[in-house]
Structure formats: C-alpha cells, structure tokens
Image: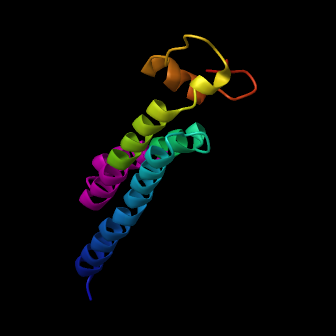
Amino acid sequence: MNIATLQNLFGNLLIFTSIFDALKYSIQANKIRKVKSAKSMSRRFINWAMSNDIIKLIYGIIIRDIYIVLSSLLSLICMIHLWIVIYLYYPYKHRGLVNFKRPNVLLYLINSLIPNSIRKRL
C-alpha cells in the first residue's frame, strides 16, 4: 500500500468515527429534551468540546485536509445543537426568582465561560 491509499483509508475511517462523535452530542440533546432540564449537563464541557473542534477545523483549513475539516464540521453542527438545547433547558426557573426571564445568548455564553467561583449565578 502506498501513502495516498493509507491516507484515504484512515481519512474515511476518521469521517466514519466522527459520526459516532457527533451522535453522542445529539443523543445528549435528545435526553435533555426528554427530561426538559439541562441540570446535569456541564456548560463548561460543551464549551471546551466546541473550542477543540473549532481549533481542529481551523487547522484542517490551514493544512487543507478535507477529512479533518469534515469531521470537525460534523461534530460542530451537533455541538451547536446541544449548546442551544442546553441554553433552552437550563434550569433558570428553579432559582426561586419571580418573573425571571432567560438571559440573552451573549450573557449566557459569557457566564458559561467564567469559572463558577467568580461568576454570577443565572
């Protein structure tokens, strides 16, 4: 086998296994929708996972590797879906506040990036 054949083989395996990686985020989003609460889901986890795939996507674009780009895009699409579901089902109402509205997306994003010890609770 030559290098090009190995590259294509493992590139296709990367895309195939990326489907499972993306599927785990879709499964998590469906579980959150089913229980109607994102209480057990870490916002920090999804932020770190998204930042990893954004860096991987940029790297794939720079080195012009279609396999890395496609695997990152596939995962990012499902991660963004999960992030939106977490935003929609985050347990704001359980704080005991009257007339509390969901914060805007930018405030939510900033709040999810700040460590728990110094952030304001939503």
In what quadrant of the picture does the N terminus appear? bottom left
Query: On the rendered structure, is 113 left or right of 59?
Result: right
| Rendered image coloring scheme | rainbow
Q: Position of residue 70 (x, y in %)?
A: 27, 55
Residue shown at 66% from the left, 22% from the top: 95
- 81 in relation to 72, above or below: above
Of all residues, the one furthest to the bottom in this rendering is: 1
Query: On the rendered structure, is 47 left or right of 97?
Result: left
Q: Position of residue 119 (x, y in %)?
A: 68, 21
Q: Position of residue 68 (x, y in %)?
A: 33, 57
Camera-side residue of 99 and 84: 99
Q: Position of residue 29 (x, y in %)?
A: 43, 48
Camera-side residue of 42 and 10: 42
In what quadrant of the picture does the C terminus appear? top right
Q: Is residue 65 one of those drawn in magenta?
A: yes
- 110 in relation to 76, above or below: above
- 62 in relation to 103, above or below: below
- 117 in relation to 97, above or below: below
Of all residues, the one furthest to the top in this rendering is: 99
Query: On the rendered structure, is 117 left or right of 26?
Result: right
Residue shown at 44% from the left, 31% from the top: 88
The secondary structure that most of the magenta stretch takes on is helix
Camera-side residue of 59 and 27: 27
Residue shown at 25% from the left, 74% from the top: 8
To which quarter of the image does residue 12 belong?
bottom left
Q: Is residue 18 one of those drawn in magenta?
A: no
Residue shown at 42% from the left, 43% from the top: 82
Q: How many numbered marks are there?
A: 0
Which residues make up the magenta segment? 52-75
